[in-house]
Image (cartoon, rainbow, N blue to C red):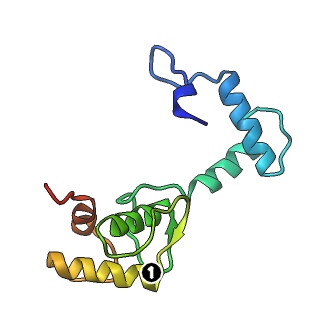
Amino acid sequence: MDKSKVKTNYSGYVVYDENVADAVKRFQKDMGLTEDGIAGTTTITKLTAYAENFKKLGDRVLSVGMSGTDVTEMKNLLIEKGYIEGTASKGVSTFDVTLETALKAFLNDVGIEWTGKTDSDIVFYLKKKYND
């Protein structure tokens, strides 16, 4: 659902209007559920499991073998910084050996030792712009 279509009330809570109900119906269709637009127990359970893949870089500690949108964000930052060739990715990526090799090269250049897991220092330097 496009964020511009999300309406909030005076307290800042999302209004469950036609736009939200339509988005719920599309999700239900994709998940093979009854398309009624009601976020009942089954829909919420599926949505919660589906949303587990959608994290921002820094939300959790990453290591090789993990997957998620936070891994994609890390990959895209390494592409942007020239440590991986290619164009930016979307969706869910897996932290594989190629990504680890690029991350190690980046960390070597900024003077951080790779311990096998991302920490706040690594996230800080990955997100840091060259002119910062």
Q: Quadrant of the N terminus?
A: top right
Q: How far across and how far down the image is residue 35, in percent? A: 83, 38
Q: Residue furthest right?
A: 34
Give the number of callouts.
1
Pick whichever, 44 or 53, lies toward us: 53
Q: How far across and how far down the image is residue 46, in percent? A: 70, 51
Q: Quadrant of the C terminus?
A: bottom left
**Residue 27 in which image quadrant:** top right
- Asked if one can make out residue 4 in the rendered structure from this viewpoint, the answer is yes
Q: Is residue 20 left or right of residue 40?
A: left
Pick whichever, 14 or 88, lies toward us: 88
Q: How far across and how far down the image is residue 10, in percent? A: 46, 13
**Residue 60 in which image quadrant:** bottom left
Q: Residue furthest front?
A: 86
- Asked if one can make out residue 112 in the rendered structure from this viewpoint, the answer is no
Mark 1, other Cα within 10 Å: few <14 / some 14–19 / many ≥20: some
Vertical order, 80 against 47 (above or below): below
Vertical order, 12 against 56 (above or below): above
- Which residue is at 66% across, 21% downward? 17
Q: Residue furthest top?
A: 10
- Which residue is at 50% across, 24% downward? 13
In the rendered structure, which amino acid carries the disc numbered 1? Val
- Which residue is at 38% across, 59% downward? 57
The residue carrying mark 1 is: 64
Vertical order, 127 against 19 (above or below): below
Q: How far across and how far down the image is residue 109, in percent? A: 18, 79
Q: Secondary structure at mark 1?
A: loop
- Which residue is at 41% across, 78% downward? 99
